[in-house]
């Protein structure tokens, strides 16, 4: 059985792992959002290939930015994760409809898993709601 000090050290370690995972994902999503405002050729080409008109790219950037900001703010992190799950689910559906390779389909799925995993490790409210047992 672990002592209180060992439990606290493990808890602190998990908190930091969750923060690191969440920060890396948030930085990637913020970068993705910024690219939707800058609109380099690859972003326009990919978005149009997925069936979205070019004039919606900035709107998608705003949606992604708002959802990501909600995710990084501790008070709204669970809402942000729910909103980002919907956004990533739309990405999965878009890639499936476009007939993209499996990597393009599973990339947002893995992101969603990491998103919730990082949040689970850094937010005691979520770990209390979904207790994992050994």
Image (tube, helix red, strand yellow):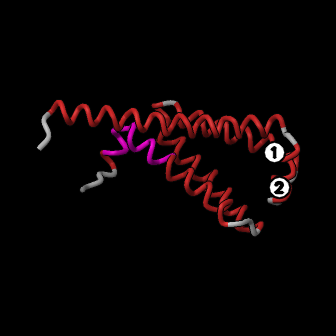
Secondary structure, mark 1, is helix
Image coords of residue 85 (percent x, y)? 56, 51
Residue ID for mark 1: 57
Disc 2 packing (10 Å; few <14; some 14–19; many ≥20): some
Q: From mark 1 to mark 2, how far is it between C-alphas?
A: 8 Å
| Number of numbered tags placed on the structure image | 2
Question: Quarter of the image holding residue 65?
Answer: top right
User: Which label number is shown at residue 52?
Assistant: 2
The answer to whether marks 1 and 2 mark residues whose Cβ atoms lie closer than 8 Å is yes
**16 sits left or right of 94 in the view:** left
Image coords of residue 60 (percent x, y)? 74, 44
Question: Which corner quadrant holds the N terminus?
Answer: top left
Residue at x 82%, y 46% (from the top left corner): 43
- Seen from the viewer's position, the closer of residues 44 and 24 is 24
Which residues fall within the magenta stretch?
A: 115-127
The magenta stretch spans residue 116? yes
Prevailing secondary structure class for the magenta stretch in the rendered image: helix
The magenta stretch spans residue 24? no
- Seen from the viewer's position, the closer of residues 66 and 123 is 123
Image position of 106 with respect to 131: above or below: below
Residue at x 41%, y 37% (from the top left corner): 17
**45 sits left or right of 132 in the view:** right
């Amino acid at each position: 059985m672990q002592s209180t000090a060992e439990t606290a050290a493990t808890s602190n370690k998990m908190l930091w792992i969750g923060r690191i995972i969440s920060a890396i994902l948030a930085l990637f999503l913020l970068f993705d959002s910024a690219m939707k405002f800058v609109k380099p050729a690859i972003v326009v080409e990919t978005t149009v290939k997925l069936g979205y008109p070019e004039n919606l790219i900035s709107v998608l950037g705003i949606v992604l930015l708002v959802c990501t900001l909600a995710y990084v703010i501790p008070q709204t992190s669970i809402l942000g994760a729910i909103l980002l799950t919907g956004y990533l689910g739309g990405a999965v559906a878009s890639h499936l409809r476009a007939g993209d390779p499996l990597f393009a389909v599973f990339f947002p799925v893995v992101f969603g898993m990491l998103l919730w995993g990082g949040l689970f490790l850094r937010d005691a409210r979520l770990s209390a709601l979904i207790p994992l047992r050994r």
